[in-house]
């Protein structure tokens, strides 16, 4: 099993191409066995039928034929009973109380069970990249929802730090006369600036 990442395509590609967008997936490195999560999947939507088709196309050669998938219905508005994929059918089930809402469970025909963190489709690129990295780190022992909560706390802390930094820069700028300089430049006579422009020669 290899670690695989597929980047989000350009907007133009999604707009003018009829083919499905590339899959966004990262799996644990070979030879490792994460305690709770085997990888992270960042679907483009909550359309389970469309998303599973692309997912199984990549995982079948790696893990053997995927035959069953289970989800928690909390974040999936429609759950089909079966999804036709390349060359076979995947049966889909759901568990509300027993399964983490941020996890996708897959059963392979030959290799057993695999668990993927499902990154919400609306997640920003930076947070999604962080989730993919932490989910495939063998040293991590958080559940899928635990990883999502950790990433959210990290995002909030990063935004607060950025806001504090901006505020500090604004304070320093003010203390050095920044606002006074801006007010001085903003009140410069417009006519004086225009008057310095060269006049066009007659007939031009």
Image: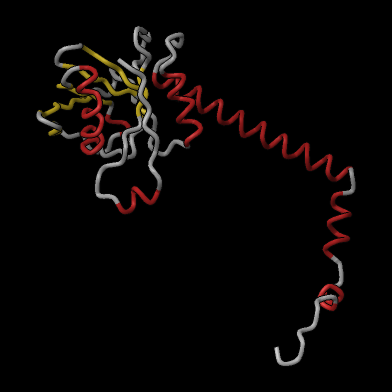
Residue 84: x and y in percent read: 12, 34
Outermost residue toward the left? 88
In the foreground, 97 or 30: 30
Q: Is residue 114 left or right of residue 175?
A: left
Q: Would you place residue 193 above or below residue 95 in this image?
A: below
Q: Give the quadrant of residue 145.
A: top left
Q: Quadrant of the N terminus?
A: top left
Q: Is residue 146 left or right of residue 201?
A: left
Colouring convention used in this rendered image of the protein: secondary structure
In the foreground, 139 or 23: 23
Q: Give the quadrant of residue 73.
A: top left
In the foreground, 24 or 120: 24
Q: Would you place residue 124 above or below residue 99 in this image?
A: below
Q: Residue at x 46, y 19 (%)?
A: 134
In the foreground, 27 or 36: 27
Residue 125: x and y in percent read: 47, 35
Q: Residue at x 28, y 34 (%)?
A: 76
Q: Quadrant of the C terminus?
A: bottom right
Residue 146: x and y in percent read: 44, 19
Residue 161: x and y in percent read: 67, 31
């Amino acid at each position: 099993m290899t670690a695989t990442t597929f980047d989000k395509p350009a907007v133009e590609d999604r707009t003018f191409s009829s083919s499905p967008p590339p899959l966004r997936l990262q799996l644990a490195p070979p030879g490792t066995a994460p305690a709770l999560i085997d990888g992270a999947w960042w679907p483009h939507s909550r359309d389970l039928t469309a998303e599973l088709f692309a997912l199984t196309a990549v995982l079948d050669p790696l893990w053997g034929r995927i035959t069953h998938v289970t989800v928690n219905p909390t974040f999936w508005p429609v759950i089909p009973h079966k999804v036709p994929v390349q060359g076979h059918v995947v049966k889909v089930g759901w568990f509300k109380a027993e399964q983490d809402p941020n996890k996708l469970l897959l059963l392979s025909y030959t290799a057993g069970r695999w668990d993927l963190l499902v990154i919400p489709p609306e997640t920003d690129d930076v947070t999604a990249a962080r989730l993919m990295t932490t989910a495939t780190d063998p040293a991590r022992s958080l559940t899928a929802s635990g990883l999502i909560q950790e990433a959210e706390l990290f995002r909030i802390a990063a935004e607060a730090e950025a806001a504090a930094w901006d505020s500090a820069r604004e304070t320093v700028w003010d203390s050095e006369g920044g606002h006074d300089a801006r007010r001085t430049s903003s009140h410069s006579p417009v006519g004086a600036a225009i008057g310095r422009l060269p006049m066009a020669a007659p007939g031009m």
